[in-house]
Image (spheres, rainbow, N blue to C red):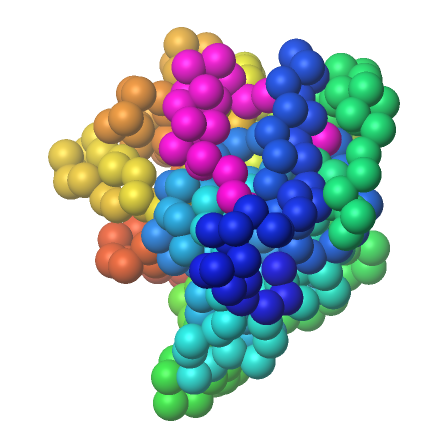
Amino acid sequence: MSDNVSLIEAIQGKRQKTAVICFADGTVLHGYGFGKTGHNVAEICFNTALTGYQEVLSDPSYASQFVTFTFPHIGNVGTTPEDLEAQKCFAAGLICREDITNPSNWRATNHFSRWAAQNDLIGICGIDTRALTALIRDHGMPHAVIAHQPDGQFDIENLIQQAKDWPGLEGLDLAAKVTCTEPYHFTEGRWTLKNSFQTPEHRPYKVVAVDFGVKKNILRCLTDAGCDVTIVPAGSSYETIMSYDPDGIFLSNGPGDPAATGEYAVPVVQKLLESNLPIFGICLGHQILALALGAKTYKMKFGHHGANHPVQNIATKKVEITSMNHGFTVDTDTLPADVTETHKSLFDGSNCGIAVRGKPVYSVQFHPEASPGPQDSYYLFEEFAEAMAEYKQKNAA
């Protein structure tokens, strides 16, 4: 909602419910709409992060998903263009517990509800998000429609049917919908309180990043680690990628079924593996790399979405607190003999990282750039830079 609602109005029951969630099983939840009007159909997931709602909603990995925020106060610090992970939002919408309040933060440049409308995000609040999260945990991520109309009038039967007819994410290549259309160069470093975003002067490593739905903060971390980054579309050929004479290849995060995206991405990555270039992947890039190496992936019951996920580095036994956003995972049992598991989730034991023995090739399922309080996993970018330094030294000899 664009403005706060008075307590008296709420107590007297005069507020009209202007939004609904219609599930494929016929369940209907009523609430109060904000942001864009109209309706969208998508899969509902839940996110357990206490902060970073703007980064979550602008992460391309959330394409075709409604995000249920378990933290009740969403929108309370407003929005700022500096916190966007992409040029636009790709999430289908969001589900909140409490009303959207006026922003209370010195960095805010826009009201959250107004920003949501400007970014085509449908929102609904007044929902028991704890109960909805429990439902997702027990029964998996449901297909649903969220609709928002100021007059509160809905064709419920039609909306339920749309939810039933939606095919879901399995077999869906969404990377093709969120990737860039043309190659571009990225030079921006990580944000600082004093200087905002600055371009690091020392960037000796030429990196080609394959954009399956890349986040800006990943690119900033690469830049800060000394990378001169060129981003290319997801469907780029091996020849196009190698034409930039890279020192390393980065496979980005992104949405959808990795097996579907892999139909065109895996053959390219397999050729890149033959080049002996350092390769680093994150999230969907991790899954694509695993497929290229001969492993398999599968859809999870409710996935991992949040900024508080403990992951163990198997080699060091250290536990890293990470950010996660994925509904598919690599099947550890299908990893080939020359691939080792490097990280695992301490929530469910699922795979969170792999490396190829004897090659500078590795990837992780989590998002090491997100810094969910601690920056436990930033070392992965530094290791990528070290691998490229060794590669350059060998080729110069």
Residue 348 locus on image (x, y percent):
30, 21
Whether residue 374 is in magenta: the answer is no
Asked whether, in this view, residue 221 is left or right of residue 233, the answer is left
Residue 226 falls in which quadrant of the image? Answer: bottom left
Task: Report the quarter where the C terminus lies.
Answer: bottom left
Task: Report the quarter where the N terminus lies.
Answer: bottom right
Q: Residue furthest bottom?
A: 194
Q: Residue furthest left?
A: 317
Can the viewer see residue 297 in this picture?
no
Q: Is residue 136 above or below residue 17?
A: above
Task: In this rendered view, identify the residue nearer to me: 196 or 126.
Answer: 126
Residue 313 locus on image (x, y percent):
23, 36
Residue at coordinates 52% horizontally, 51% vertically from top-left? 12
The total of numbered circles placed on residues is: 0
Q: Residue furthest front?
A: 12
Residue at coordinates 53% horizontally, 32% vertically from top-left? 45
Task: In this rendered view, identify the residue nearer to me: 320 or 18.
Answer: 18
Can the viewer see residue 225 in this picture?
yes
Residue at coordinates 66% horizontally, 55% vertically from top-left? 34
Residue 258 falls in which quadrant of the image? Answer: top right
Residue 253 locus on image (x, y percent):
56, 44
Residue 391 locus on image (x, y percent):
45, 54
Whether residue 129 is in magenta: the answer is yes
Task: In this rendered view, identify the residue nearer to me: 265 or 195.
Answer: 195
Magenta segment: 125-145
Residue at coordinates 45% horizontally, 20% vertically from top-left? 135
